[in-house]
Amino acid sequence: GENVEQHPSTLSVQEGDSAVIKCTYSDSASNYFPWYKQELGKRPQLIIDIRSNVGEKKDQRIAVTLNKTAKHFSLHITETQPEDSAVYFCAASIRGSARQLTFGSGTQLTVLP
Amino acid sequence: KAGVTQTPRYLIKTRGQQVTLSCSPISGHRSVSWYQQTPGQGLQFLFEYFSETQRNKGNFPGRFSGRQFSNSRSEMNVSTLELGDSALYLCASSPAGTGDYGYTFGSGTRLTVV
């Protein structure tokens, strides 16, 4: 089955700096890659996603890049703010199949004021 | 529009007991998935239901089961509880049966087995 590895497990940045979280996946059939943000004690929330026919997608300060050949994808957060502090999860799945997301192990992002 | 509602929010059970958790998806959403979240194993897929049919099941023992009703509400059941079943159980709904529409997660049920 699919295996998703996520790095780093913890990341601390100064407010205003950029943060990058990287994930690799094993199943070349995976073609949908969402990112979730989970604040302490709250539900995971979808923040951005990308399909395999797209190399990059941006939404304000958040961007995701995908390298299908290398089977890795990354989340980029620019101009970080304290409210960006949370655990971020990447995931992978195969479009068109019964929904099953395989999640990475999560990255605890701390934005220092 | 109401979100995904999970009940109860917190639950304490004794080893050997069984438990039933409930999930009401967003109105109009027909796909409901369940995940177990633990500090050690992260988010792991349990099963997915669409139109009252289980279409996919994760790598969990048969003690974990579920069902979906005609109104798309779903329940999951865990029998013969073990200490290792202590976790946050998350339900997620999505509008389509297949495809890549993003999940909307509920707030979860925190199960503690003592």
Image (cartoon, helix red, strand yellow):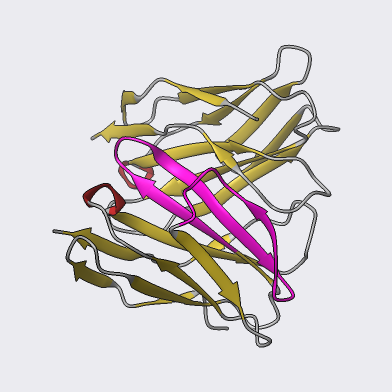
**Residue B70: quarter of image:** bottom right
Main SS, magenta region, reads strand
Residue located 77% across and 20% down the image: A68
Q: Seen in the image, is B10 located left or right of residue B1?
A: left
**Residue B73: quarter of image:** bottom right
What range is drawn magenta here?
A: B33-62
Q: Nearer the viewer, residue B70 or A75?
A: B70
Residue located 54% across and 29% down the image: A76
Q: Quadrant of the N terminus of chain B?
A: bottom right
* Residue A6 x, y percent position in the rendering: 48, 24
Residue located 47% across and 49% down the image: B61
On screen, residue B79 above or below B85: below
Residue B45 on the magenta segment: yes
Residue B47 on the magenta segment: yes
- In this rendering, the count of numbered labels is 0
* Residue B105 x, y percent position in the rendering: 50, 62
Q: Nearer the viewer, residue B43 or A37?
A: B43
**Residue A73: quarter of image:** top right
Q: Quadrant of the C terminus of chain B?
A: bottom left
Q: Seen in the image, is B51 located left or right of residue A78?
A: right
Q: Residue furthest bottom?
A: B71
